[in-house]
Image (cartoon, helix red, strand yellow):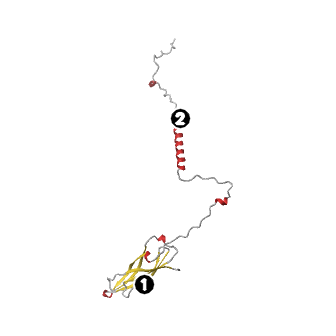
Amino acid sequence: MTDTSLPPMPSMPPTPSNDPSPPAKKPRTNLVIIGSAAAVIAAIVATGFVVTQSRNDGSEPASTANPNAHTEDAVPAEKPDPEPTYITVDADSFTIGLKTTARQCFGSAGCNVTVEPDLTLLGDTEAIDPDAVYEITYEIHGDESGPVIETAELSDRTSLNYTPSMISTASSGTQVSAEITDVSVQGE
């Protein structure tokens, strides 16, 4: 007959390193609880920050409307815009120079010179009336027959209209200059 007996039992239980079964997992309940608590605390701090900032923005709290008030009383009356004020423009409001655009000299007989005004407003262009047209009268010095009087028109604060001036100088060394003598507003 055959022996059907079982092998003898070991004296010690098997060690985990010899056990082929996977190790038992620890529950992660503590991690879930800690994570949830951190999320709740962060939400409370963020809400407190938003509430504090909204109270410190300098605005007054909205008032409740009187239920007995008429809606017509609640609308403030519109004030008309005040008329804008502009500076008074005069001869001292500008500086003028001359730009030479052409020169033809004839030895000792002098030169024919074409010049254009180079005006600069002293101050802010926004301070003058955009609807006004200013007539700027100026004298050109250096022509052999005497001063030449010309007029330029300034409109839209920056648009200057003029006619170039042709003068004759006594020599090629003659200095040509200009000075503003008058500024007036068209239509006044």
In the rendered image, the vertical position of residue 103 relative to residue 25, given as above or below: below
Q: Residues within 10 Å of mark 1 (few under 14, many from 20)?
A: some
Residue 139, position in %: x, y?
41, 82
Amino acid type, mark 1: Ile
Residue drawn at x 53%, y 47% is 52
Q: Residue furthest left?
A: 108
In the rendered image, the vertical position of residue 18 relative to residue 130, given as above or below: above
Residue 156, position in %: x, y?
50, 74
Helix, strand or loop for disc 2: helix
Q: Residues within 10 Å of mark 2 (few under 14, many from 20)?
A: few
Q: Nearer the viewer, mark 2 or mark 1?
A: 1
Helix, strand or loop for disc 1: strand
Residue 79, position in %: x, y?
59, 65
Q: Is residue 61 left or right of residue 88?
A: right
Residue drawn at x 47%, y 71% is 125
Amino acid type, mark 2: Ile
Return the residue nearer the eye: 8 or 43.
Answer: 43
**Which residue has dot 2 on it?**
33
Badge 2 vs badge 1, beta-carbon distance below 8 Å? no
Residue drawn at x 67%, y 58% is 71
**Which residue has dot 1 on it?**
149
Residue drawn at x 66%, y 60% is 73
